[in-house]
Image (spheres, rainbow, N blue to C red):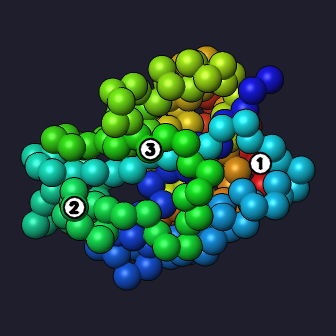
Amino acid sequence: MTRALIVVDVQNDFCEGGSLGVDGGAAVAGAISAALRSGQQGRHWDHVVASRDHHADPGAHFSDAPDFVDTWPPHCRTGTPGASFHPELDVARIEAVFDKGLHEAAYSGFEGIEPGGASMGAWLRAHDVDAVDVVGIATDHCVRATALDAAAGGFTTRVLLSLCTGVAPETTTKALEQMRTAGIQLAR
């Protein structure tokens, strides 16, 4: 089995102090880096990829009066520090970055494209990946969407909860149940 780690949206705007900061975001960035350096808990990844929110003009996704379900405050604008990976995330092992949401809302890393034009799914298949571990921000939004798309795409999917953080307990609980129902393994 060839396993890849998918690092979801560990960006400045999604960590403390960012325009959509999630409590624990910086700690997750550091924990992912530590896991990559040490092979934490016996985990081994043949490949490491990342998704990145990368908005230029996402239309109704941005709002001055966001509902925090379908509309959000401006975040991860192309070319701004908020769109950059958090400095605690060691990007040395990341082989491909998939930008998503340039002109629309995008939650799943599988909606992203790398600079060569490949989608995440196509890139993983081209590298013979059949299993993925999903980590990052936020458990109840982009991690959930990425994991669901991975499972729907035929990848054996596991979410490593100790390397994720969610926005809110209620929506995180719902997301965990949705992932569990889809056959995704939830691990610590």
Q: Quadrant of residue 132?
A: top right
Residue mark closest to the camera, 1 vs 3: 3
Amino acid type, label 2:
Gly
Sequence-first tag of 1 and 3: 3
| Residue at which label 3 appears | 97
Label 3 Cα crowd, 10 Å radius (few <14 / some 14-19 / many 20+) = many
Quadrant in which the N terminus appears? top right
Q: Are marks 2 and 3 in contact (CB under 8 Å)?
A: no
At which x and y percent is residue 149? 50, 29
Q: As shown in the figure, which amino acid type bears the numbered disc 3?
A: Val
Q: Secondary structure at mark 1?
A: strand
* Label 1 environment density (alpha carbons within 10 Å; few <14, some 14–19, many ≥20): few
- What residue is at 89 percent from the left and 50 percent from the top? 42
Q: Which label sits on residue 79?
A: 2
In percent of width and height, residue 161 lies at 68, 55
The local crowd at label 2, few if under 14, some if 14 to 19, many if 20 or more residues have their Cα within 10 Å, is: few
Give the Cα distance between marks 1 and 3.
24 Å
Pointers 1 and 3 in contact (C-beta within 8 Å)? no
Whether residue 60 appears in this view of the structure is no
Task: Residue at 46%, 69% (x, y): give it.
Answer: 86
Left or right: residue 90 compared with residue 187: left
Label 3, secondary structure: give it. Answer: strand
Q: Residue at x 34, y 36 (%)?
A: 115
Which badge, 2 or 3, comes first in the chain's sequence? 2
- Provide the residue designation for mark 1: 187
- List x then y, in percent, for residue 15: 44, 72
- How far apart in space, not on screen, are marks 2 and 3 (Cα)? 15 Å
63 w.r.t. 47: above or below? below
85 vs 54: above or below: below
Mark 1 or mark 2, earlier in chain: 2
The residue mark sitting in front, 1 or 2, is: 2
